[in-house]
Image (spheres, rainbow, N blue to C red):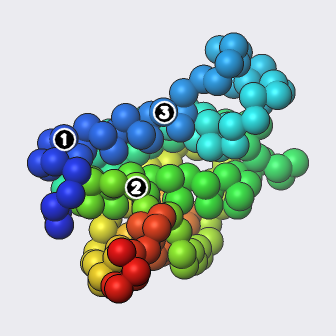
Amino acid sequence: MGRGGGGGGEERAMAAREWLESLMARVDGASTTAAEFAGSKAGNFDAIAMWGLKVLHVGGGRALCSLCVPKFLTGEDGYWHAGSIATVIDDVGATAIMTAEGHIKVSVDFEISYFSPAKVNEEVEIDAKVVGHKGQLSVVLVEIRKQLSGELVALGRQWMSTPRMIIKGNL
């Protein structure tokens, strides 16, 4: 899937993993417990939405992660918030693209279908795969499934582009 840019496949995979893990890093004295972190004024939505995310594999246009849904990311009904799911899809999808392209891209079209709710303390697997490129655009599909049953929780499709488009004749 690699299209050059940003070094070899292993270098791109390492850079993508480091980028994803940096989003999850604790910020300015944030607490070590999930509950304290959620209540802090850390201001890093990505870190909160991906609390406890485990990176299982990154490389070759793919990012595979797992997550145990924490209580503070669920509603009163105990189901994982849709906004948090969207953040995970966005960031893990961007990571998969980074392994193929060697640089970060931004979302320009983002669609999510929700199938089955995930509950608090339920383990889910997030699998992002780059499925194509067209010019500066790349498309990634991200599946979130319950680990025990394999049941589909959500399916995301997003087109991403380089942050700054270079227009021919405007160099």
Seen in the image, is 4 located left or right of residue 62? left
From the top left corner, tell me how far across and down residue 115 is, in percent: 59, 72
Can you name the residue that lies furthest to the left here?
A: 8
Q: CA distance from mark 2 to mark 3?
A: 13 Å
Secondary structure of the residue carrying tag 1 is: helix
Secondary structure of the residue carrying tag 2 is: loop
Secondary structure of the residue carrying tag 3 is: helix
Mark closer to the observer (2, 3)? 2
- For this rendering, which residue is in front, 109 or 157? 109
Q: Which residue is mark 3?
A: 22
- Splitting the image into 4 quarters, where does residue 83 fall? bottom right
Residue 11: image tag: 1
Task: State whether residue 86 is above or below residue 55.
Answer: below
For the N terminus, the quadrant is bottom left
Residue 104: image tag: 2
From the top left corner, tell me how far across and down residue 110 is, in percent: 56, 75
Task: State whether residue 21 is above or below residue 157.
Answer: above
Question: Answer yes or no: do the residues labelled 2 and 1 have beta carbons within 8 Å?
Answer: no
Seen in the image, is 46 located left or right of residue 71? left
Task: State whether residue 137 is above or below residue 104.
Answer: below
Q: CA distance from mark 2 to mark 1?
A: 14 Å
Q: Residues within 10 Å of mark 3 (few under 14, many from 20)?
A: few
- Amino acid at the residue labelled 1: Glu
Q: CA distance from mark 1 to mark 3?
A: 16 Å
- Mark 2 or mark 1: whose residue is earlier in sequence: 1
- Mark 1 or mark 3: whose residue is earlier in sequence: 1
Task: State whether residue 118 is above or below residue 10.
Answer: below
